[in-house]
Every structure is written in C-alpha cells, then in structure tokens.
Amino acid sequence: MASILLRIGAVLLGTAMMVAQAQAGPWPGGRKAAVVLTYDDALPSHLDIAIPALDAVGLKGTFFLIGSALVPEQIRRWREAAADGHELGNHTIRHACPQANYPPARKLDTSEAYDVEMMLAEIRTMNTMLAAIDGKLQHGFATPCGQHMAGGVDYLPALRASGLVRYTRSAAWTGGKVLDPMDVPCRWFDEKATGAQMIAEVESAARTGDLVVLGFHGVGGDYLRVPGEAHAQLLVYLKEHADTIWVAPLSMVMDYAASRAGN
Ligand SMILES: [Zn+2]
C-alpha cells in the first residue's frame, strides 16, 4: 500500500500543543483513504433520517450540536446515539455568525456582537452541556458558518491556546496537503447533490490517499438539505468499500493522525 505523506501542522494532545510533521498514512488496516461524515446544527433530520441510515450500514458520524437548538425531548436520543458510537461535537450555544450570513433578517446573536472572551466562554459552557449528554470530558468543535471571527477578531489563536477543544472543523476546502487539526477543512453539498457526486468526492480522496471531511446540514429534511436518497447512496458505497475506505468520527481520525505524528 502506497504510503501517504500528510503534514500535521499542529497536533493537540490534551492541553499541550505539539508541532510535528508526520506520515499519516496508510490509514488503519492499510486502507487507502479516510472519510468523516459530519452533520451540523442538531437538526431533527439527523435523529430521524441520518442516524438511522448510518446505523443501517454500521457507520458512525460526527454531530455538531448547537446548545440553543437542543430540546429536552431529544436529549435521550442524542445520548443513545453517542452510546452507539456516534460522536457529539461542540457548535457553540447560539451559533453566532456574521450578519451577512442572515440577510435580510437582523439577528441579535451575530458574531460582530461577540468578543473573543465571550466566544470561548460559550464554547466552554457548551462542552459542559455535551458532557452532561455523552459523559465525555473532551469534544471537538465546528465553527458556526465556517468562520472564526468574534467582534472582528480571529478567535482561533485563543481557542488553540485554551485547550478547550480537541480539534476544530473549520472553513471550506482549500486544497493542499497541510492538515491542521485546529482548522480542518470540509466539503459541502447543495440541495441538488446526487449520490454520484458525493461518491466522486470520496473516490477522488481514495485516489490520493487523502482524508476527506464531508459536511451536511439537513438530510432529507430541514434546511440546506441534501436528498435523503443521495445520502443513503453514499453510505451504501462506503459500506461496500469498507476494506479500502476508513469511515470514522473526526476525533478518531485526528487521534490516529496524532499517533502517526508521534512515530
Ligand atoms: Zn452550523
């Protein structure tokens, strides 16, 4: 199996930041590529459609929850999903994004109205909420709207220094081979996405021995949704190619990359 050079810019180990360069591949079991399925905003379609679809093929996803979007009736279901091996992650409590993301409505909780301290305090409190649900003491993080500004200041340096989160899934895919666990890129699909398009992304990653993180909002419902059928086709493909493609929650993939970095 061809080895893969994957440079790790910074690896978060506990609260200590270690800078290393590493050979991350081959992936576990000699597989060619790693795929992470991430789902944002704690949407009902995650519980009703995405998780049952994942469970049907035995795959695990990563779900970034917004504290203010959680309702008491769903807590038990999120807890069960975590107990079944799905990962719950931090997506803040109020999902503060720039006003420009919400035209024309005026939002109270814009990222312009925050400062760095407020954002980190919110991430810390969301960690506590997640611990109350899944019992885990550490969580990963996904930036609201793929950006990390608070009051006009980039809060990612402060978040790195804080050790509050294990990793950060951040902006859109920019290409290249530099993997920074605190700024992991993600690929998104629009409402017209087909299963074939999603599979093509995975096949592209498999050809280069790469990691691909796929991002979803609604699945077969809710907003920014991809068709449930397309999502299901992707999962069937991943299941059928389990011998060559590693599908795992993002924390597991980051831990694996960090362990390779330490070799
Ligand atoms: Zn979001």
Image (cartoon, rainbow, N blue to C red):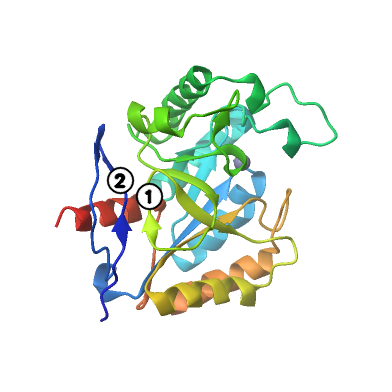
What residue is pinned by disc 2?
Answer: 10
Q: x, y percentage for residue 7? A: 30, 59
Q: Compare marks 1 and 2 and give the one earlier in the sequence.
A: 2
Answer above or below: position of 195 versus 254.
below
Q: Tell me the crowding category of disc 2: few under 14, some 14 to 19, or many 20 or more residues within 10 angstroms, Cα based.
A: many
Q: Is residue 66 left or right of residue 108?
A: left
Query: Quick check: which quadrant has ligand 1?
Result: top right
Labelled pair 1, 2 in contact (Cβ < 8 Å): yes
Q: Point out the residue furthest to the right here.
A: 104
Q: x, y percentage for residue 124? A: 43, 24
Residue 85 visible to an observer of this rendering: no
What residue is pinned by disc 1?
Answer: 180
Q: Name the foreground residue: 221 vs 97.
A: 97
Q: How many marks?
A: 2
The numbered disc on residue 224 is none
Residue type marked 1: Asp
Residue type marked 2: Ala
Q: Name the foreground residue: 73 vs 151.
A: 151
Q: Which residue lies at the image location 52% right of the left edge and 42% below the top edge?
A: 64
Q: x, y percentage for residue 99? A: 73, 31
Q: Determine whether the residue tagged by mark 2 lies in a helix, strand or loop.
A: loop
